[in-house]
Image (tube, helix red, strand yellow):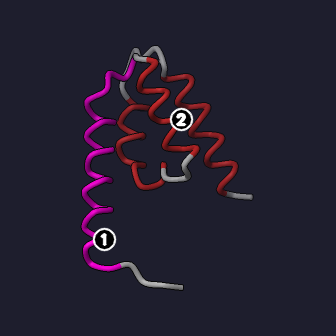
């Protein structure tokens, strides 16, 4: 297995910060938020953004809250297989 360079590590951290910013700036009650979370999950990278995902789940009166809870439950189930 090959190690990644410091430059690649920095680039990875910058990309993760950009995704975090997108998650926090996208309205919770939008289809765009669901699509973003779904895409991140399909890429297998949602665990990097657990805190941002959790924040979206706990906001009250959220139209997509049920869908996010289903995704979260599925992720927990799959991670325990």
Give above or below for 45 relative to 21: below
Quadrant of the image containing the N terminus: bottom right
Give above or below for 48 relative to 38: below
73 in the magenta segment: no
Which mark is nearer the camera, 1 or 2?
A: 1
Residue 45 locus on image (x, y percent): 49, 53
Label for residue 9?
1
Identify which residue is drawn at 31% across, 70% down: 8
Gap between marks 1 and 2 measured at Cα: 25 Å
User: Residue 41 vs residue 62: left or right?
Assistant: right
Identify which residue is drawn at 38% across, 78% down: 4
Q: Secondary structure at mark 2?
A: helix
Residue 10 locus on image (x, y percent): 25, 67
Q: How many marks?
A: 2
Residue 32 locus on image (x, y percent): 42, 22
Q: Residues within 10 Å of mark 2 (few under 14, many from 20)?
A: some
Identify which residue is drawn at 56% across, 39% down: 72
Magenta span dominant secondary structure: helix
Residue in the foreground of this view, choosing between 1 and 41: 1
Label for residue 38?
2
Indicate which disc, 1 or 2, sits on the residue closer to the N terminus: 1
User: Residue 42 vs residue 55: left or right?
Assistant: right
Identify which residue is drawn at 30% across, 71% down: 9
Give above or below for 39 relative to 65: below
Give above or below for 62 relative to 55: above
Q: Secondary structure at mark 1?
A: helix
User: Which span of residues is magenta-colored?
Assistant: 5-29
Q: Residues within 10 Å of mark 1 (few under 14, many from 20)?
A: few
Residue in the foreground of this view, choosing between 67 and 32: 32
């Amino acid at each position: 297995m090959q190690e990644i360079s410091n430059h690649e590590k920095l680039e990875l951290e910058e990309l993760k910060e950009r995704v975090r910013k997108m998650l926090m700036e996208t309205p919770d009650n939008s289809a765009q938020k669901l699509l973003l979370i779904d895409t991140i999950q399909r890429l297998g990278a949602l665990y990097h953004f657990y805190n941002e995902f959790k924040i979206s789940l706990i906001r009250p009166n959220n139209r997509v809250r049920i869908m996010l809870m289903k995704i979260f439950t599925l992720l927990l189930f799959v991670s325990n297989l």
